[in-house]
Image (cartoon, grey):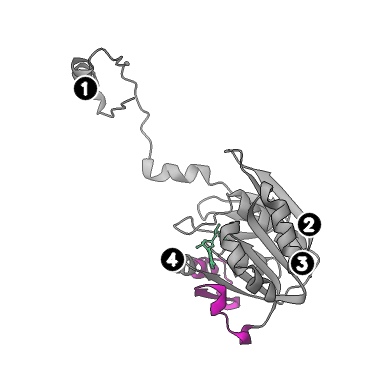
């Protein structure tokens, strides 16, 4: 199929030209396209995402009236992954929220921070300090910018790089969260588990429902026990899975 956009005044001339070269193919009648502010239309699908009665994630241009006690994370949708709209992010946020509703976290580690949405949410939900890293320098930069936008920059340390760049002095964390697919998780799983404090938890997202058994077995080999899990199917039919595990 060939779609041609033309100024309305020239639509019939364009249609006649298409008929002349169509070689027997059907040429549909011209249809008007309603004039819209195209540079702004991408914003339409980005509404506030209500994770729970305690947490909302939204872009700066979508207002949300916060309920009593509800906190928000404002993320500028740019290049880094993590507007909150993807199931893997929303599931990780839901598990973080449920955990931090009852547990204190002095330190949170977010591996693969993207936009920084998970680390910033943890800070908004009561964590004292967080460290975030991402292999992608653009993501690290956007994590910093979003931290400033949310007023938590002073409590969030960000670096571009992998977990092994964290020296021994960085110690362990009450909450470690990683929203990465399993092919990215496996090479760093041992190191990531080493960063979980003795009484801490690890949140894994970006997993597929079909990987539940393999992930559960791998965590068990690292002496981690799954205590809660959430699933969500996306519009393409993929089932996303997130887990929270303790030692
Ligand atoms: C699916 S995105 C998650 C972004 C955000 N945390 C969220 O939950 O929406 C995964 C991010 O992990 C980063 N990443 C992948 N492997 C990594 C690794 N080994 N170390 C650090 N970051 C990694 C990618 O660059 C990407 O930004």
Q: Which of the labelled discs sits on residue 228, or is there none?
A: 2
Q: Which residue is mark 3?
A: 224
Of 47 and 220, nearer the camera is 220
Mark nearer the viewer, 3 or 1: 3
How far apart are the alpha carbons under marks 4 and 3?
32 Å
Q: Secondary structure at mark 4?
A: helix
Q: For the residues labelled 2 and 3, say whether their Cβ atoms are less than 8 Å apart.
A: no
Q: Would residue 120 be seen by someone viewing this image from the given angle? A: no
Residue at 62%, 64% (x, y): give it.
Answer: 178
> What segment carries the magenta color?
143-170
How far apart are the alpha carbons under marks 1 and 2?
60 Å
Residue at 60%, 63% (x, y): give it.
Answer: 185
Mark with earlier residue (3, 1): 1
* Residue 43 in the image, given as x and y percentages of width and height: 47, 46
Of 44 and 112, nearer the camera is 112
Q: Secondary structure at mark 3?
A: loop
Confirm if mark 3 falls within 8 A of ligand 1: no
């Amino acid at each position: 199929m060939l779609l041609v956009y033309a100024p309305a005044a020239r639509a019939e001339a364009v249609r006649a030209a298409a008929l002349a070269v169509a070689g027997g193919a059907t040429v549909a009648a011209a249809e008007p396209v309603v004039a819209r502010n195209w540079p702004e239309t991408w914003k339409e699908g980005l509404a506030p995402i209500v994770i729970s009665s305690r947490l909302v994630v939204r872009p700066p241009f979508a207002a949300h009236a916060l309920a009593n006690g509800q906190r928000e994370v404002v993320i500028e949708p740019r290049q880094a992954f993590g507007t909150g709209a993807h199931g893997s992010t929303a599931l990780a946020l839901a598990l973080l929220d449920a955990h931090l509703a009852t547990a204190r976290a002095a330190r949170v580690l977010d591996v693969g921070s993207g936009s920084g949405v998970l680390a910033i949410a943890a800070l908004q939900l009561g964590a004292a300090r967080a460290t975030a890293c991402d292999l992608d320098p653009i993501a690290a930069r956007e994590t910093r910018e979003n931290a400033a936008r949310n007023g938590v920059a002073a409590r969030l340390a960000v670096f571009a790089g992998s977990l092994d760049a964290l020296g021994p002095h960085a110690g362990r964390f009450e909450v470690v969260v990683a929203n990465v697919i399993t092919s990215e998780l496996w090479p760093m799983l041992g190191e990531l588990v080493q960063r979980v404090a003795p009484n801490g938890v690890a949140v894994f997202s970006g997993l597929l429902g079909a990987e539940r058994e393999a992930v559960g077995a791998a965590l068990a080999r690292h002496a981690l026990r799954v205590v809660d899990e959430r699933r969500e199917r996306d519009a393409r039919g993929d089932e996303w899975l997130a887990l929270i595990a303790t030692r």
